[in-house]
Amino acid sequence: MNKNKKIKLKGSSIFYKHKPLNKKQKPTKKEKVVSITKKGPINKTTKAKKNIKKTPIKPLNTPTKQNSRYLPDIIEKRYIFLTVIIIIFFATIIGRLFQVQVLDNEKYNEDLIASTEIVIESTSAPRGRIYDRNYKLLVDNEAVKTIYYKKESGITTTKEIELAYTIADMIEVDYSRLSENMLKTFWYYNNLETAEAKITDEEYQKYQERKLTDDDIVDLIYERITEEELSAYDERDKETAYIYYLMNKGYSYSEKIIKNTDVTDEEYALISENIDNLSGFNTKLDWERVYLYGDVFRSILGNVSSSSQGIPEELSDYYLENGYSLDDRVGISYLEYQYESYLKGTKATYKVTSDNNYELVSEGKRGSDIVLTIDIDLQQYLEETLATEVLTTKYEANTTYYDHSFAIVSDPQTGEILAMAGKQVKEDENGNYYVTDYTPGIVTMSVTSGSIVKGASMLVGYKYGAIEIGEYQMDECIKIKATPEKCSWENLGYINDISALAYSSNVYQFKIAIKVGNGNYRYNESLVLDESAFQKYRDMYASFGLGVLTGIDLPVESLGYSGTSTLPGHLLDFSIGQYDTYTPIQISQYINTIANGGTRYQPYLLKEVYKPSEEEGETFGEKIYTAEKVELGTVDVEEKYMNRVQEGFRAVVSFGLGTAYMGNYQSIGAGKTGTSQSFIDTDEDGVVDTETITTSFVGYAPYDNPTMSIVVVSPDVAVANAETTSSINRRLSSQIVNKYFEINK
């Protein structure tokens, strides 16, 4: 065998083969031809060759007689098996076809229609109405004729400019807000070649080298557009330029309002009749919110996004997660935002028919109507009175840094807000004062409350055994080493707990705080107090709603400031309301808790919710929500101690400081005044630099089973150490309480 000869066949392994002989070549003497027989090898020269019988070689796969008789059985079994498989396969197909075409025919027809049918929604639906507690309508919807533009896919800038000119000839648009930059943009797109020629070769080179951006190139072009080039535009061109601006502001393919104010019937009809030739322009009857009491309670009622605005970017994540579209009109602040789920309407849906018309699938519905706890008559009076008083006060002496006051009227038995407002005085460029709304500050701005918190401080003393009911203390200045004296507004002598509240003794509270802190006071010596006393005071205050969120149903609420120092002097300040700060709504929750005997209720503004009426002439449909008072906690003191604080508050308006504060006015059942030191940053450098006086008043009436409470706060109403302080709180309190009882006879 020739071991040097290798042959590789496709699909085979390498094997060796005998070297073939040439036909003419004879074997050498050394070579032998070998045949394999039954008897072994035989030499070719042997004569017995003729007698050898050759044995034929059988094919490997050829059946023998013994197994050939089984072949038909194997083939038959395989045929039967294959036949069964085919029968099962076709039976399955036939069964499935029967189910689809007969049994489930209706279902699949519906699915087919649903998958191929185009259903669209109307652009918006009217929102629910808003009423006051006496079902007086506050906020309604008004139909507004609207001309709008929605960019079609693939439209060119040239075509849009042509459309803008066409629309300018069809309707009148107020273009007084057209700015020079808008006009330059219009000129730029009208004169692209001329605009590009304003860029030098050197600047284009820098642009190619990425040393200048697209914005840089546009800015250079805008800088080089001359007044002469712009002056070529007449009034028609300017109106067109403004329309073009309106067509392209905001999201590219959202609806752009071109005109929705003072749209005449002729303009509305002209656009409606020509929408086939005005690519993207159309008309609709939109709606706008109407406020029947003008600006009264306006900031808390909140706002709704406009048709052109859609969902503001800062709220888009929230609304998109809840199934809204970017061009939906939604509540974006205060009550409109807080109760969006009730107020939003259901948009009408339409099916696009084969002839490209619209077929109504379901009618749109107005949103649900909400009823507030607010008494709009009391609210209107409060706002008017507050605006007058803050303006009057600003012209009084020592009011250099004063600019706003707050007032709240609520029901201490439920937490319902009956009226609330804040008003701020501002100065115009000519030095004249004017008043603006500041009502949101009730839940966001904190103040130094002063002595009004002494009711809670007194209860700390009762609870921890620092004083007993009727206990007397000497009102005398407290002096801690290396600190100024701490005194009451005057030396009140030997007084008990009721007199301490009636005359607003600071020293009485100082002595309570020292005992709560396990201190040993000696005049002009160091004072050491347990730091845990701070937490005892804060826990008591929190049970009244001071220093914690009240839970009012508005989307924003602030906590106020909580001091971090634990110096003994700061504990004494804390006990008289001179350390932590609180929002007016927290102070309202505090006086309500005292008025009702110790239960802290969540303040709220939503009273009821009704579905829109489907019956003609009916104001409301089905009631779907009725507010219930929510108890947030109770004050952890014995009832006798709470009663004692209530007696002290009655003494304030009977014979204490409240008599001078309230004059001869006796309708208020109980109350507490407060005067505190405040500090402000007058030069806006981030550092407080000026001391002021903040005054407050809290009260409720009648004394037994009160139905109303009042809070009035006037921050920075006077400069420190002023000889006189404005009586704005007394004036406001008297007038507001009088009005309440006039309305609720």
Image: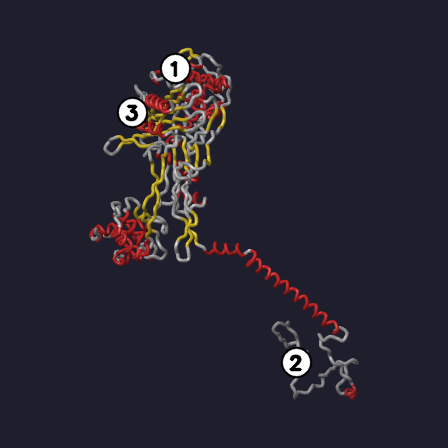
Instruction: Give the residue at x 51% y 22%.
Output: 636
174 left or right, relative to 24: left
- Of the two numbered discs 2 and 3 on the same chain, state the one appearing first in sequence: 2
- Of the two numbered discs 2 and 1 on the same chain, state the one appearing first in sequence: 2
**Residue 698 location in percent, x, y?**
39, 22
Q: Residue furthest top?
A: 494
Dot 3 surroundings within 10 Å: few (below 14), some, or many (20 or more)? many
**Residue 530 location in percent, x, y?**
49, 22
- Of the two numbered discs 3 and 1 on the same chain, state the one appearing first in sequence: 3
Check disc 1 and report the residue beneath it: 654
Check disc 2 and report the residue beneath it: 19
The amino acid marked with disc number 3 is: Thr
Number of numbered discs on residues: 3
Instruction: Give the residue at x 63% y 75%.
Output: 6
Q: Nearer the viewer, mark 2 or mark 3?
A: 3
Q: Residue furthest front?
A: 616
Front one among 106 and 69: 106
**Residue 639 location in percent, x, y?**
50, 19
